[in-house]
Amino acid sequence: MTKRDAVFPADRHALYEAHGYSAAIRSGDLLFVSGQVGSRSDGTPEPDFGQQVRQAFLNLRQTLDAAGCTFDDIVDVTTFHTDPEKQFPTIMDVKREAFSQAPYPNWTAIGVNWLAGFDFEIKVIARIPAAASLLSN
């Protein structure tokens, strides 16, 4: 069995260590990013919902950066929401900033009743540019 190729952003290990998971796993030319929440570096949630969503996207950006990816490399997005109807306007504002032009990635939004103290989570699958170019040669 091949060992997992884990990716971690700098200074973002509190939740990963506490809960025993990797920020992302590289597999071939794909990057599977674990759900990113609006946590501060010590693992505590950002109290303001808008800031929590922005922090989740920032944490996602840092994980993508660590693997050599950007938001343009994302092909699939799944988001989790504790109160979708009330939260969607805020989430959509931040999402439009991150994905500002078509073609947009796939997106699945799921309403949940618990996110371990958080109110928003985003997980993605991205294509790794360097790996993709190596595979096409």
Image: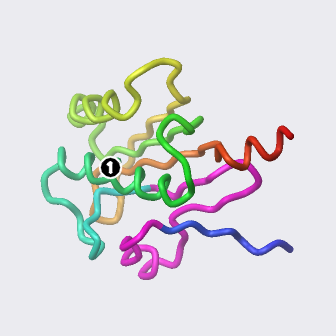
Mark 1 crowdedness (10 Å alpha carbons): few <14, some 14-19, many ≥20 = many
Residue 134 x %, y % = 79, 46
Q: Which residue is mark 1?
A: 120
Q: Which residues are magenta?
A: 9-35
Q: In which quarter of the view is residue 81 placed? A: top left
Question: Residue 110, how many percent across, how many down?
Answer: 44, 40
Residue positioned 61% across, 53% down in the render: 32
Q: Amino acid at mark 1?
A: Phe
Vertical arrangement, residue 19 with respect to residue 93, above or below: below
Q: Quadrant of the C terminus?
A: top right
Image label count? 1
Q: Position of residue 88 (x, y in %)?
A: 27, 31
Residue 47 occupies which quadrant of the picture? bottom left
Magenta segment includes 26: yes
Q: Within the magenta stretch, is there residue 16?
A: yes
In this rendered view, identify the residue nearer to me: 22 or 7: 7
> For this rendering, which residue is in front, 112 or 44?
44
Residue at (34, 65) in percent of width and height: 116
- Residue at 48% x, 18% y: name it: 102
Q: Quadrant of residue 133?
A: top right
Please state, as top left, top right, bottom left or bottom right, where the N terminus lies in the image: bottom right
Q: Report the side of 92 relative to 134 (left or right).
A: left
Q: Secondary structure at mark 1?
A: strand
Looking at the image, is 39 positioned above or below residue 112? Answer: below
Q: Residue furthest left?
A: 48
Using the image, determine if residue 86 lies above or below residue 82.
above
Question: How far across and how far down the image is residue 76, in percent?
Answer: 57, 37
Which residue extends farthest bottom?
Answer: 18
